[in-house]
Amino acid sequence: MAANKQLHVIVFLLSYLVTRQAWFGNGASSAPQEIRKGFSVTHDSSYSEFQSLLADPTGVFSLGFLRVDSSQLDLAVIHLPSSSALWRANPARPLPWSASASLSFNGSLVLSDSRTGVLWSTATDDGDRVVLLNSSNLQIQKMAGAAATVLWQSFDFPSDTLVQDQNFTSTAALFSKDQRFSMRLGASCFALYMELDGSSTPALYWKHSALDVKAQIVPDEGPIYARVDPHGFLGMYQKEAAPVDVFPFDSFNREISGLRRLTLESDGNLRAYYWNGSIWARDLETIAHRCELPAVCGAYGLCNSADSRCSCLDNSTEEGCLPPGSGHFCGDRGSEFRILRRNGVDLANQELVAYRKVASLEECEGSCEQNCSCWGAIYHNVSGFCYRLDYPIQTLVEGDMRREGYFKVRARTSGGGVGRTATVALLVVGSVVFAGAALFGAYSLWSRRKQMRAGMDGSMVEGLAPGSYKDLNSASFRSLELSDTFSFRK
């Protein structure tokens, strides 16, 4: 028994050393705890995942070149026991892993590439040294004897994560790893936003306001800031004495000794974790229901609240839902668009979307149709509220049939995606050979449809107005997409 136990220990140690070697290469344990002026190092792509350049005094954190998503390179501070990046220097513009990148320090810490030049810099000309604290905070310091003045620190420039005791101010923002979502601090709240291509104004999809009656935000007494507290909450503060608001984690006021972090993840959810010695244990999931995530079903997707299944607003199945830019046509002269109407659609975050009371569905639709920045609108025919969506349509949720959606959508091309110009060209090429057959076929089809319409007039579709299919009893008609094709010229 003792021999077997010793064998297991030896196997474990060997496995640990092999894994550590694969991750760090040869330089993890020898990384310095201080960088001085004149430092320069070039990225060595022979390292498997991480090239350690600077260590904190406890050996828990390290600064170095990190492989991101298997093929990209960035400068990062990682938590060594979990190999998790807590801070990244240049997440919006990572380099290829094989790039000839270098890091240097001559008063300012500079990440550069031989082809593109300077990629990122701390812009601190007078720094004397770079240190990594045991909190994971990377600092540029100016020394005066034994005293140090902090010129720059990574805690002021978070990427997607806040660690405990890191102040988060209104001058900073968290961005998800893919840069699609952000977390920002307001005058009395913190909120989550969806970043929009080509727009300086992100779309708000979740917000938490300070509601603690025991404290209050005092005007003109300075800005508020947020901080992950070791006791298991995100606090909003104006002064150090007491938080003006407490946003609790699952382990609130439980004795947890491990490091805590709060991360904005790539699905748009804000989650908290603590390190229990072997894994990051989840401690908070801000958005609990999958359908309330801003883009869980993608562009023009529809999420079923009962089972979280995804479908498409236009009932697409073979080709998938519409692409993200399908509704944006401002400036697209001569482009063809259709109006997609759908009953039973709703907003997961309707309380955060601006609305106005209108007299009718037609007025709600008209206010969107005449506005170039409007992508769609949702009308509640009981309250009369009209919610206008001035941003690209992402995931909506299935609602009751009293809510009607209206969306301006770029018309699909026919023939498996063949565009308008290509279609014309194909018709010209085959016109001599196939003209007679095409005309005959078109005439036959027109004749049959005319007969069918004659038989249907006066039956169940008589008097049906475009978009008014909610009163039909047939399930197939309730899910029907009614659309018209227009040519919008701006």
Image (spheres, rainbow, N blue to C red):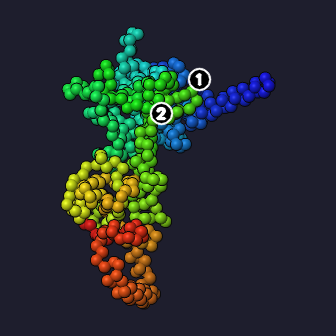
SS for tag 1? Answer: loop
Q: CA distance from mark 2 to mark 1?
A: 31 Å
Indicate the quadrant containing the C terminus: top left, top right, bottom left or bottom right.
bottom left
**Crowdedness of circle 2 by 10 Å Cα count: few (<14), some, many (20+)?**
many
**Crowdedness of circle 1 by 10 Å Cα count: few (<14), some, many (20+)?**
few
Check disc 2 and report the residue beneath it: 283
Q: Residue at x 33, y 78 (%)?
A: 461
SS for tag 2? Answer: strand
Along the horizontal axis of the image, is 186 left or right of 64?
left
Along the horizontal axis of the image, is 55 left or right of 148?
right
Front label number (2 vs 1)? 2
Check disc 1 and report the residue beneath it: 29
**Type of amino acid under label 1:** Ser
Q: Earlier in the sequence, mark 2 or mark 1?
A: 1
Q: Residue furthest front?
A: 473
Q: Residue furthest top?
A: 145
Q: Is residue 314 visible?
A: yes
Indicate the quadrant containing the N terminus: top left, top right, bottom left or bottom right.
top right
Along the horizontal axis of the image, is 466 left or right of 51?
left
- In the image, 207 versus 15, the foreground residue is 207
Q: Position of residue 140 (x, y in %)?
A: 40, 22
Q: Residue at x 32, y 45 (%)?
A: 204
- In the image, 1 versus 125, the foreground residue is 1
Q: Residue at x 20, y 28 (%)?
A: 219
**Type of amino acid under label 2:** Asp
The quarter of the displayed image where residue 388 is located: bottom left
Q: Is residue 112 visible?
A: no
The quarter of the displayed image where residue 226 is located: top left
